[in-house]
Amino acid sequence: EKSENFAPLFPALLNSYERSYMSSADGRFRITIDKNLYYYSMLGRTDFNGYLVEEPGIILEVKYEEEDDDKAAFILQNLPYRHTKSSKYVNGVSMTTGF
């Protein structure tokens, strides 16, 4: 019997946010809206003393199947927001550690 050793895992980031869910009447498009995003880096820490960083703004995500790409393009072009890719994890690590 072979035994593998793995390094222990530790959390790198705590994040918190409020999320709202919506969907189209036919259920093909789902929207999530995240706001009040807070982050706390756990790198080199063993305790949590409250969130240290707040990310301003709101993240709106449109979710759909690949077959609905053409319809999604129409929806996205009619939203009055800047379209970007976003990761709460990447944003949180960057904002709390300077990476």
Image: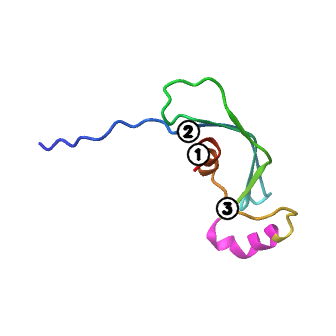
Q: Closest to the observer: 88 or 93? A: 93
Alpha-carbon neighbours of circle 3 within 10 Å: few (<14), some, or many (≥20)? Answer: few
Tell me if residue 70 is in the magenta stretch.
Answer: yes
- The residue that label 1 is drawn on is 93
User: Closer to the camera, 64 or 4?
Assistant: 4
SS class of the residue under badge 1? helix
Which residue appears at 53% of the width and 34% of the height?
A: 42
**Closer to us: mark 3 or mark 2?**
2
* Picture quadrant where residue 25 is located: bottom right
Q: Which mark is residue 13?
A: 2
Please tell me which of labels 3 and 2 falls first in the chain: 2
* Residue under the point 81% across and 73% down: 74
Which residue is tagged 3?
85
Amino acid type assigned to the residue bearing label 3 in the image:
Lys
Please state the horizontal and vertical placement of residue 29, each as a whole percent of the image.
Answer: 73, 60
Q: Residue at x 86, y 68 (%)?
A: 78
The Cα–Cα distance between marks 2 and 1, rounded to whole angstroms, is: 7 Å
Q: Amino acid at mark 2?
A: Leu
Q: CA distance from mark 3 to mark 2?
A: 20 Å
Identity, as a three-letter code, of the amino acid under mark 1: Val
The answer to whether residue 73 is magenta is yes
Q: Is residue 34 left or right of residue 46?
A: right
Of the image marks 1 and 3, the number of the one nearer the N terminus: 3
Q: Main secondary structure of the magenta part?
A: helix
Query: Secondary structure under badge 2?
Result: strand
Where 50 sits versus 75, above or below?
above
Q: Earlier in the sequence, mark 2 or mark 1?
A: 2
Report the span colored magenta.
Answer: 65-76
Quick one: which residue is furthest to the left in this view?
1
Query: Contact, CB < 8 Å: mark 2 with mark 1?
Result: yes
